[in-house]
Amino acid sequence: MRRLGTLTPEKGADTLAWLAQGSPGVEWESGQLYVKRKIAKTHVQALDEDLSACSWDVSARMVGLDAEG
């Protein structure tokens, strides 16, 4: 029986492969979030610069890197 909501590897990789093979400004717009080859709405937290900086610093510390680089 086929599971609901599962994708084949090919379907799951389709948008990523499309982006990798295309050119920004031609097939797709740089800096956008894509789902099924279409621009998707970005969550408001993704645009929070303070949250982004904090996440970067925490992640760097967790892997033993200097947060600045």
Image (cartoon, rainbow, N blue to C red):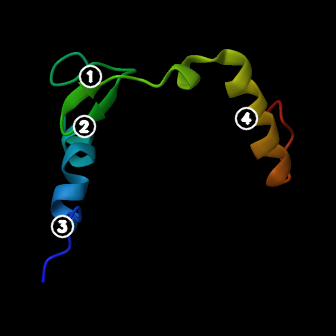
Given contact means CB atoms under 8 Å apart, are the residues at marks 3 and 4 in contact?
Answer: no
Which label sits in the foreground, 3 or 1?
3
Front-most of residues 6 and 59: 6
**Which residue bears the numbered disc 3?**
8
Cβ atoms at labels 1 and 4 below 8 Å apart: no
Q: Which mark is residue 19?
A: 2
State which tag comes first along the sequence, 1 or 4. 1
Question: Could you tell whether 30 is left or right of 54 in the image?
Answer: left
Q: Position of residue 20 (x, y in %)?
A: 27, 41
How dense is the environment of label 4, judged by Cα within 10 Å: few (below 14), some, or many (20 and up)? some
Looking at the rendered structure, the secondary structure element under dot 2 is helix
Instruction: Tell which circle, 2 or 1, labels the residue nearer the N-terminal end.
Output: 2
Mark closer to the chain start, 3 or 4:
3
Horizontal and vertical percent for residue 41?
35, 22
Look at the image and tell me in which quarter the C terminus lies. top right
Q: Is residue 10 left or right of residue 45?
A: left
58 with respect to 19 (left or right): right
Q: Is residue 27 above or below residue 37?
A: above
Q: Residues within 10 Å of mark 1 (few under 14, many from 20)?
A: few
Upstream in the sequence, badge 2 or badge 4? 2
What is the crowding at mark 2: few (fewer than 14 residues within 10 Å), some, or many (at least 20)?
Answer: some
In the image, what residue occupies the spot 82% across and 52% down? 62
The amino acid type, in three-letter code, at marker 3 is Thr
Q: Position of residue 31 (x, y in %)?
A: 40, 21
Q: Which mark is residue 24?
A: 1
Evaluate if marks 3 and 2 touch, with contact meaning CB atoms under 8 Å apart. Answer: no
Closer to viewer: mark 2 or mark 4: 4
